[in-house]
Image (cartoon, rainbow, N blue to C red):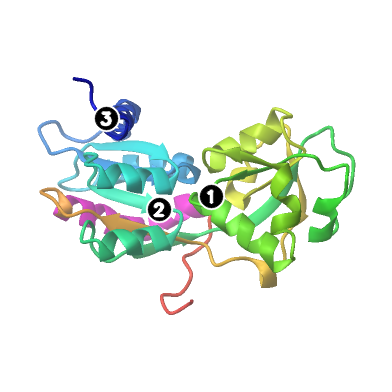
Amino acid sequence: MSAPPATRRRSTGLLRLAASFVLASALARPGLAELRIGAASSLREPLGAIALLFAQQPGAAPVAIAYGASSSLAAQTRAGAPLDLILCADERIAVELAAEGIAEAPVRFAGNRLVIVASRDLTLPIFSAQDLARPEIRRIAIPEYAVPVGRYARSWLRLHGLAETLEARIVRTEHARATLAVVDQGHAELAIVYASDARLARSARIVFEIPASEQPRIAYAASVLRGPRAALAHAFVSFLLERDAQAELARAGLEPPPPADSP
């Protein structure tokens, strides 16, 4: 008898995650336990460099990283994915994992901000949020609400009373990097993306810098999952907060983490 659809979907997701791991620290000494990290797609460039730096530390272990939307990584963790650490682009996801007893209390390690990028074919200037409602803008790339950048983007649109007005124009994407790709490939005129991702655009360009007073609080958080390699995961989180790792995050366009007492 075949497995129920939900079980098949869960198994497929776990297989996809296992296939997506990238061994990021080949310099580590063989024979040590491998640290498996699930990381937000917006961390791909700096995290690869940080993993290599971590591998050179005393007692370092190989680091394998799977990238994706934070919400998807959390769902796969709940389904039994073999992860030791999740690096989320939304602290709320990390808090939920801790409340469920799956992970320890989250640790903030980076921040980000939102910008609007446009396809190279769009000549319409964007001076304010209200310009997104102009008829020339037919498609706006944003992930689903469950994906951190999708929640942040919709929060900003609600601030300006545009969430419902623009709903029919939204092109839903899988995660932050996919959102940028949609505009780069000309499948949408605009996208709301992380400033760090906008730096990687091939043809899209930043057309509007969302004012600091309107930015959602974007806090990246590390969640150490309960398991046999928790101590190794803690060592990686501690390294994330050190100067060299923070410098890599800054070079990639990320910002310091919001203060621990910020809302």
Q: Nearer the viewer, residue 170 or 44?
A: 170
Pair 3/2: label in front: 3
Q: Position of residue 200 (x, y in %)?
A: 62, 38
Pair 1/3: label in front: 3
Which of marks 2 and 3 precedes in the sequence? Answer: 3
In the rendered structure, the answer to whether residue 98 lies left or right of residue 145 reads left
Which of marks 1 and 2 precedes in the sequence? Answer: 2
**Residue range corresponding to the magenta coloring:** 231-253
| Circle 3 residues within 10 Å: few <14, some 14–19, many ≥20 | few
Q: For residue 244, what is the image quadrant?
A: bottom left
Q: Residue at x 18, y 20 (%)?
A: 1
Residue corresponding to mark 2: 88
Asked which secondary structure carries label 1, the reply is helix
Q: Is residue 82 above or below residue 89?
A: above
Q: Residue at x 50, y 53 (%)?
A: 148
Q: Position of residue 59 (x, y in %)?
A: 15, 46
Q: Nearer the viewer, residue 205 or 86?
A: 86
Indicate which disc residue 251 carries.
1
Residue corresponding to mark 3: 4
Q: Determine the CA span between mark 3 and mark 2.
A: 30 Å
Q: Position of residue 42 (x, y in %)?
A: 50, 45
Q: Is residue 195 above or below residue 221?
A: above
Q: Is residue 124 above or below residue 1?
A: below
